[in-house]
Image: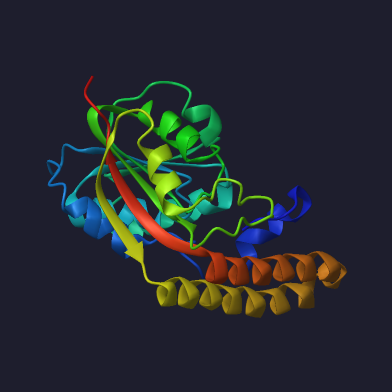
Amino acid sequence: METTPDFLPYLPELLIDLWELGSSVEQIVEMVGQLKLPFAKAKVLDLGCGKGAVSITLAQKYGFRVTGIDACTPFLEEAIKKAKEFNSSHLCHFEFGDIREYTQQERDFDLVIYASLGNVLGDYKEIVKNLRNMVHPGGYMLIDDGFLKDDTKVEREGYEHYFQHDKVIQQLTSFGDKIINEMIVPDETIRSVNYGYLNVIKRRSKELLEKRPELKEAVSEYINNQEIECKILSKHVTGAVWLIQKNED
């Protein structure tokens, strides 16, 4: 979803058919379900919630009370509509906000989710540092991202936080927290999802250009960047979901 500020207003139209927006929803739901958090009592925070796919699915399946934070108003509006559609409005609260600011104040959630947000909060050590503010001692942090397949460093903005698996694990546990589950996402799944999204975006871009031909250069640049992202992720990054328990000290 990387783009220039000027092009941001057009993203919702290009992504109108996509609900999950890159998050590994099935894997997240499965992993969270293994925690056996108390139904109707557990408080969950979904940072960068997008259109609410993770939030609503967890609320609907487990009865959790979920707070979703995002800085894209059209996405939040769609999340609110989806919550109503799935009869989960009473469990889901969606709020406009910058997660970089939101995570600076201590919270008391049982679980915080950071899914498909890249290095918005920094490298993995910084990400965990921020997430720890959001949960009580003994609470959980779930990160949906990945690690480098080999020693090749990706020289591209937005990939600075990617390292080999051992270094990523070291950063994730920098504060003495425990990784209680790690789920590797198959390469074929990542490839299928990414290129599936790309095809949907290309189709919608043609419709956008029929209405706004002056955006041809900006749309072409966005599509080209998405193609590059798909190639890099397929070649260099292994997808993974980590569930981390904050230490109680």
> Does residue 97 show up?
no
**Can you say which quadrant of the picture contains the N terminus?**
bottom right
Q: Quadrant of residue 29?
A: bottom left
- Where is residue 110, by image quadrant? top left
Q: Nearer the viewer, residue 235 or 49?
A: 235
The residue that appears at 30% across and 59% down in the rendered structure is 183
Rendering coords of residue 112 (x, y %): 34, 39
Question: On screen, 157 above or below 23?
Answer: above
Q: Residue at x 24, y 55 (%)?
A: 31
Residue at left offset 27%, top offset 44%? 91
Residue at the far right in the pictured view = 214
- Quarter holding residue 120: top right
Residue 65, how many percent across, how many down?
Answer: 26, 41
Left or right placement of residue 194 versus residue 166 in this view: right
| Closer to the camera in the image, 171 or 58 | 171
Instruction: Tell which of 8 and 184 is nearer to you.
Output: 184
Q: Nearer the viewer, residue 71 or 87?
A: 71
* Image x and y of residue 173, in percent: 35, 36
Q: Position of residue 4 (x, y in %)?
A: 75, 52
Instruction: Classify residue 68 as left or right of residue 236.
Output: left
Colour scheme shown: rainbow
Left or right, 144 with respect to 50, comes to left
